[in-house]
Image (cartoon, helix red, strand yellow):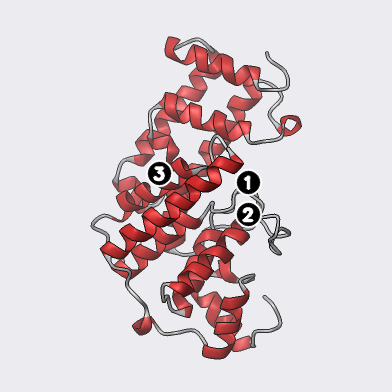
């Protein structure tokens, strides 16, 4: 954590979430230094109507970005799906409504700049998640979130980092967002395979799995990772059953690539986008 925080402030931030151990949002750092971390009693609860407006505003902005970044997976459709899965996971929850709204806000912003570098930005040296967290904090301040809530949102977005093994969801809110982010596996097997292929298309060609069997093994490893991220909320919705079905599909495909005819055209497309088409 930056030395600009006192030892007491460091401890207070970590008590909110370990994933805000390094805060790159200058405005948030300044506000914490000047105002401290606001108690829960000062939390703002985003109303249902306000959240509808926020959802529309951010998704429209993401649509605008999509016209420039043109990513097959990390796009407005993915952000909308994550938002909707958060709604599913928190319906009837014992969580405070103000906390649920923070997860929704983080869902909208978690891939805000994924694959899209702002040429004028001073943040380009940061990860996509860190950049997205900074933009989310700017928005959170604008709508009147407390410093504590802004730390929560910052940590939520950082927790979705997939490429750094040392970053893991720390709080219950973060665990909900992460499984919502990974939750494409609750869709049909064909749709999930399509999404997995779309993710592969965003990987530089030289870094993709060498062939189809290696690609299938990577999907199996991904499912293992997801299994570790299942939450009580997702299990209550039966998501673990959907996950087991995907394990079964992958194992069958590894044994027989044409075991289910509707998969054959998709499998052919996947194979053609890998370094060795075997």
Q: CA distance from mark 3 to mark 2?
A: 19 Å
Any part of residue 222 in sight: yes
Q: Secondary structure at mark 1?
A: loop
Q: Which mark is residue 115?
A: 1
- Horizontally, residue 264 falls left or right of residue 212, namely left
Residue receiving disc 3:
81
Q: Quadrant of residue 143?
A: bottom left
C-beta proximity under 8 Å, tags 1 and 2: yes
Residue receiving disc 2:
128
Q: Secondary structure at mark 2?
A: helix
- Look at discs 1 and 2 and give the one toward the viewer: 1
Q: Residues within 10 Å of mark 3 (few under 14, many from 20)?
A: some
* Residue 192 position within the rendered picture, expressed as x and y whole percent measured from the top left: 45, 30
Q: CA distance from mark 1 to mark 2?
A: 7 Å
Figure check: 10 above or below 231: below
- Which residue extends farthest left? 92
Figure check: 255 above or below 187: above
* Residue 27 position within the rendered picture, expressed as x and y whole percent measured from the top left: 58, 77
* Residue 274 position within the rendered picture, expressed as x and y whole percent measured from the top left: 68, 22
Q: Residue at x 50, y 32 (%)?
A: 195
Foreground pick, 112 / 90: 112
C-beta proximity under 8 Å, tags 3 and 1: no
Query: Reading the chain from its start, which is encountered first: label 3 or label 1?
Result: 3
C-beta proximity under 8 Å, tags 3 and 2: no
């Amino acid at each position: 954590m930056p030395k600009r925080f006192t030892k007491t402030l460091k401890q207070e931030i970590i008590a909110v979430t370990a994933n805000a151990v390094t805060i790159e949002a200058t405005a948030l750092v300044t506000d914490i230094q000047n105002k401290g971390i606001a108690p829960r009693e000062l939390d703002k609860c985003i109303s249902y109507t306000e959240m509808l407006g926020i959802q529309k505003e951010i998704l429209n902005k993401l649509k605008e970005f999509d016209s420039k970044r043109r990513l097959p997976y990390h796009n407005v459709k993915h952000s909308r799906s994550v938002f909707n899965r958060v709604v599913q996971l928190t319906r009837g929850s014992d969580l405070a409504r103000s906390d649920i709204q923070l997860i929704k806000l983080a869902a909208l912003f978690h891939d805000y700049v994924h694959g899209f570098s702002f040429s004028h930005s001073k943040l380009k040296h940061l990860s996509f998640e860190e950049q997205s967290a900074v933009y989310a904090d700017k928005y959170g301040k604008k709508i009147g979130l407390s410093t504590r809530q802004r730390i929560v949102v910052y940590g939520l977005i950082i927790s979705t980092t997939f490429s750094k093994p040392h970053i893991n969801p720390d709080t219950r809110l973060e665990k909900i967002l992460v499984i919502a982010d990974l939750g494409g596996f609750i869709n049909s097997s064909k749709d999930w395979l399509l999404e997995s292929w779309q993710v592969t298309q965003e990987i530089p060609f030289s870094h993709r799995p060498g062939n189809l069997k290696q690609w299938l093994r990577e999907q199996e490893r991904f499912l293992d990772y997801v299994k570790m991220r299942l939450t009580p909320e997702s299990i209550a919705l039966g998501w673990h059953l959907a996950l087991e079905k995907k394990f079964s599909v992958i194992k069958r495909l590894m044994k027989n690539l044409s075991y289910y005819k509707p998969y054959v055209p998709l499998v052919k497309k996947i194979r053609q986008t890998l370094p060795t088409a075997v």
